[in-house]
Image: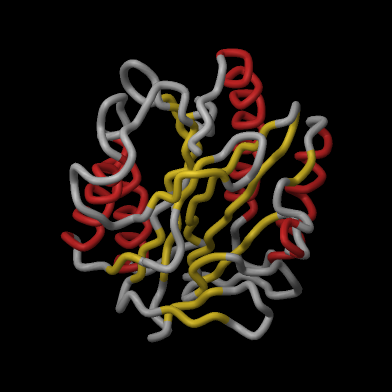
């Protein structure tokens, strides 16, 4: 069942979303050559806790860190560690914060120093596909109207959509119904209603769509070794334009 949030619950989700967006921004500022993924994780965790929140991902289904940090051909769920970033890497940061009984969830892919034009284009198109999708995140539309728009943007630019992992509802639980594929047919899926809170998150591969699950049980990579990018925000369905609850601060 898709949970519709009350005005009070939405206010609480705005609070969680603001902290989560700030944590993503902090992580992005740290992406530079020589920085380890563990140091990004640790700084973000300290920031989240300083706000009175807790990291949503830490120990979630056994995940051992507070931030998912996925580099180059890693699509999602990369585990932070001693790895130092290098010039030309692209780094996907996925973070969540829990406060007041509700979660925020967002992600973005950041360039490490100067990256290739192809890598920057992948980052840009992945982000663009999110915004193309949420053009249809309006009361009365169908869920897969979002999905189809994400797919059209990514594939129309020569990239591939990851199909095994999807967006999701978010609220008092990190993952709630409905699942939100990044591919689909317009006019299909549940009708969108005011009060729905959704994590829309394109995962886009530079090469083929095929993926590989690594032995750590978490990290997902592209099967062909080509780069991947990820972009996500938590949004609210309103009676007009969708509200991005994890919007970056201006």
> Which residue is drawn at the image coordinates 18% and 46% (left, top)?
186
Q: How is the image coloured?
A: secondary structure
| Residue 18 position within the rendered picture, expressed as x and y whole percent measured from the top left | 61, 29
| Residue 26 position within the rendered picture, expressed as x and y whole percent measured from the top left | 65, 43
> Which residue is drawn at the image coordinates 41% and 60% (left, top)?
203
> Which residue is drawn at the image coordinates 65% and 37% (left, top)?
103
Depicted 30 relative to depicted 215: above or below: above
Depicted 6 relative to depicted 148: above or below: above
| Residue 237 position within the rendered picture, expressed as x and y whole percent measured from the top left | 40, 26
Farthest front residue in view: 1
Count how many numbered circles sit on residues in the image. Answer: 0
| Residue 86 position within the rendered picture, expressed as x and y whole percent measured from the top left | 57, 72
Query: Image quadrant of residue 176?
Result: top right
> Which residue is drawn at the image coordinates 83% and 34% (left, top)?
50
Left or right, residue 6 beside residue 47: left
Left or right, residue 218 beside residue 52: left
Query: Image quadrant of residue 69?
Result: bottom right
- Taking depth in this image into account, of 82 and 225 the one nearest to the observer is 225
Query: Image quadrant of residue 98?
Result: top right
């Amino acid at each position: 069942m898709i949970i519709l949030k009350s005005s009070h619950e939405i206010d609480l989700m705005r609070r969680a979303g603001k902290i989560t967006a700030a944590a993503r921004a902090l992580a992005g500022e740290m992406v530079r050559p020589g920085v380890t993924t563990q140091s990004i994780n640790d700084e973000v965790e300290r920031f989240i806790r300083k706000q009175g929140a807790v990291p949503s991902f830490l120990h979630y289904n056994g995940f051992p860190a507070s931030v998912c940090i996925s580099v180059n051909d890693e699509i999602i769920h990369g585990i932070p560690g001693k790895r130092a970033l290098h010039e030309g890497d692209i780094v996907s940061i996925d973070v969540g914060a829990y406060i007041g009984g509700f979660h925020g969830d967002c992600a973005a892919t950041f360039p490490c120093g100067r990256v290739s034009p192809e890598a920057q284009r992948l980052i840009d198109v992945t982000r663009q596909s999110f915004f193309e999708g949420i053009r249809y995140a309006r009361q009365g539309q169908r869920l897969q109207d979002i999905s189809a728009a994400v797919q059209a943007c990514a594939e129309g630019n020569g990239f591939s959509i990851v199909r095994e992992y999807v967006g999701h509802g978010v609220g008092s639980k990190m993952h709630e119904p409905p699942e939100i594929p990044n591919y689909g047919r317009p006019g299909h899926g549940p009708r969108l209603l005011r009060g729905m809170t959704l994590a829309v998150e394109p995962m886009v591969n530079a090469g083929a769509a095929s993926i590989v699950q690594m032995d750590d049980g978490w990290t997902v990579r592209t099967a062909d070794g080509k780069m991947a990018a990820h972009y996500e925000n938590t949004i609210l369905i309103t009676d007009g334009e969708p509200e991005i609850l994890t919007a970056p601060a201006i």
